[in-house]
Amino acid sequence: MRHWTRELTAAACIAVFSFPATADTIFGVDAGVGLWLAGPDGNIGGTAVDVEALGLSRETNAFVHVALEHPIPLWPNLMLQHTRLRSSGTGTLSRQFELDDVVFSTGETVSTDLDLSHTDAVMYYELLDNVLSLDLGWTLRVFSGHARVASRSRTLSENVDIDAVIPMVYGRALLELPGGFAVNAQANFIGYSGNSLQDLSAHVAYAFESAVDVGVEVGYRRFALELDDDARTDVSLSGPYVAVAAHF
């Protein structure tokens, strides 16, 4: 991630521009909390070690968000979101694996802990706010995680901190349906010179009639990271999620 942060930052600055604002007439707060059953897929390293060989498994991760929408012209709305995103396990290597110049041998049993937890600050404008809602803006994603691999048969281990701030383009579309239902799609993306980071999700929501709009969401989310450097990382974590949301 250290190899491409600067390039992606430059690309995002080119991609992000000043969107015209469609302001809310009143202040609004949206908040939600949910659970995401994320399973890993892909490979890591120049020798393309599969995540299954590392023993990485499907885990339930929590996420929470709060958004403030306001009527101030030209100022973007703001959403803060935190996602715990971890996968760990034990596996036997089918080929040699290297993490930050530390080499683990073929046939070695290793314990792996991958933490891609992150916090987002999303600044966006409402381009449409009707039966069809459309938001567009940008995200600053702050990673605060690590990748740890330790041999079970010898005193060999390595820990790499994953600390980076990545700018991404943000978009969301929501279509309201009869009977309190709605469908929603959301995307964060950045890509440059063979490197990319994308976070895509879609869900169906149902809102209960009450003084405060409370609803449930059932959806699917996919997080994918591709690095075209010495690490040759091509990893995704994806799966279904459920959430409870409220609008004040």
Image (cartoon, rainbow, N blue to C red):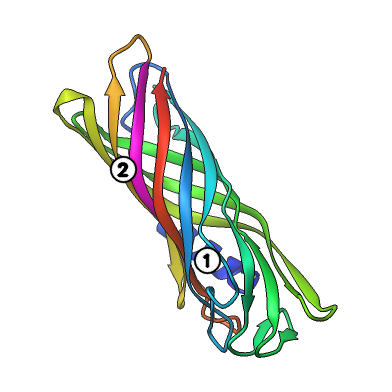
The location of residue 194, given as percent across then percent down, is 45, 77
Q: Pointer 2: residues within 10 angstroms few (<14), some, or many (20+)?
A: many
Q: Residue at x 46, y 47 (%)?
A: 36
Quadrant position of residue 214: top left
Q: Residue at x 51, y 59 (%)?
A: 58
182 displayed left or right of 93: left
Answer yes or no: is residue 2 visible: yes
Answer yes or no: is residue 188 visible: no
Q: Pointer 1: residues within 10 angstroms few (<14), some, or many (20+)?
A: many
Query: Marks 2 and 1, how far apart in space?
Result: 28 Å
The location of residue 21, given as percent across then percent down, is 34, 34
Quarter of the image for the N terminus: give it.
bottom right
* Residue at the far right in the pictured view: 155
Count the numbered circles shown. Answer: 2
The residue that disc 1 covers is: 8
* Residue at the far left in the pictured view: 178
Magenta stretch, overall SS: strand
**Which structural element holds mark 2?**
strand
Q: Earlier in the sequence, mark 2 or mark 1?
A: 1
235 or 133, which is in the foreground? Answer: 235
- The three-letter amino acid code for the residue at tag 1 is Leu
Residue 173's place in the image compared with 24, above or below, is: below
The residue that disc 2 covers is: 203
**Which structural element holds mark 1?**
helix
The location of residue 32, given as percent across then percent down, is 46, 31
